[in-house]
Amino acid sequence: MEPMNEYERQREERIQRNNAILKQLGVHTAAQKLAAGRGRRPPQRLKRKAPVKAAVRKCARLSREDQEGPKKENLKALNTEHDELMTLKDYFKWKGQDVNGIIVDGQYRGWVCPAICKKYGIPDSEEEAFALGGSGRGGSKGAKTGKMHGWSNARAFSATQLRTNPNAYFYRHVAPDEEQAQGDWTEEEHELFLETAKANGVGDKWGLFASHIPARVGYQCSAYYRETIIPRGLIIDPRFRMSRAGKAVFVG
């Protein structure tokens, strides 16, 4: 064996020192165990993931095969509101209410309240008012002029029609020296509504009708008629039907 040169001798000494350090730390032993364990472990087969089932939409409705035939009393609950509409007579009979309302045909046959006519120079009849408008002499005594801030064109125009077309005027405006009432109707207003309907009929020309009720305008009277008067059976108007929910519906 040839003697080692100086480089080889130093290299061998470094290897021996390193092995001694690794032996003290137990690195060789751990590496040997790990290698042995890897050699003995049988190869593992990859497990296939079970297919994910598609989400099924839950529905409260049964299939036609599982669903029982609807009972007669349940068919009414399935009706739409339109299908539920009843005549006023049938509605109050269904409610068990005995009503004795004013019977009308949906037409108002009166004119402007006489006191209003006299105070503001409104003609005494529709014919006279029409003639006045056609003559170009229909200046509206006391009527509102000009367009107020926020008014629609219809409201602005109707404000000029006190003498020539009072129905249009009082549909959107109260008398010139009055302030429009808002909110719930008073008992006095309520009674005045019924008195006017009994004397002149009710159901159209709401501006003329409203002239008999101070501080109320035509569209307020129309809404009160539909929302309060008809549902309570105070007036029987054949042009209306009632839903089981108690809503008056105009059918003409």
Image (cartoon, helix red, strand yellow):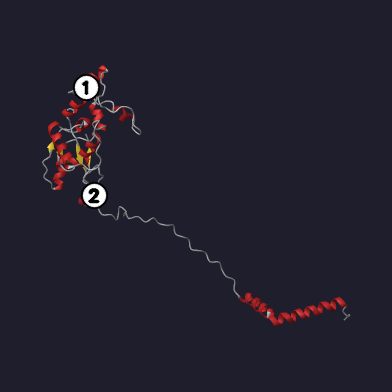
Q: Badge 1: few (under 14), some or many (20 or more) residues near its Cα, within 10 Å?
A: many
Query: Is residue 28 visible to the viewer in this orientation of the structure?
Result: yes
68, above or below 179, in the image: below
Determine the secondary structure under disc 2. helix
Judging by the rendered image, the residue that carries numbered circle 2 is 77
Q: Residue furthest top?
A: 135
102, above or below 142, in the image: below
Specify the amino acid type for callout 2: Ala
- Is residue 42 toward the left or the right of residue 220 in the image? right
Quarter in which the C terminus is drawn: top left
Question: In front of the other: label 1 or label 2?
Answer: 1
Specify the amino acid type for callout 1: Ala
Query: Residue 237: which quarter of the image?
Result: top left
Determine the secondary structure under disc 1. helix
The numbered disc on residue 129 is: 1
Which residue is painted at 20% across and 51% down in the image?
A: 73
The numbered disc on residue 205 is: none
Which residue is painted at 69% across and 79% down in the image?
A: 28
Query: Residue 240: which quarter of the image?
Result: top left
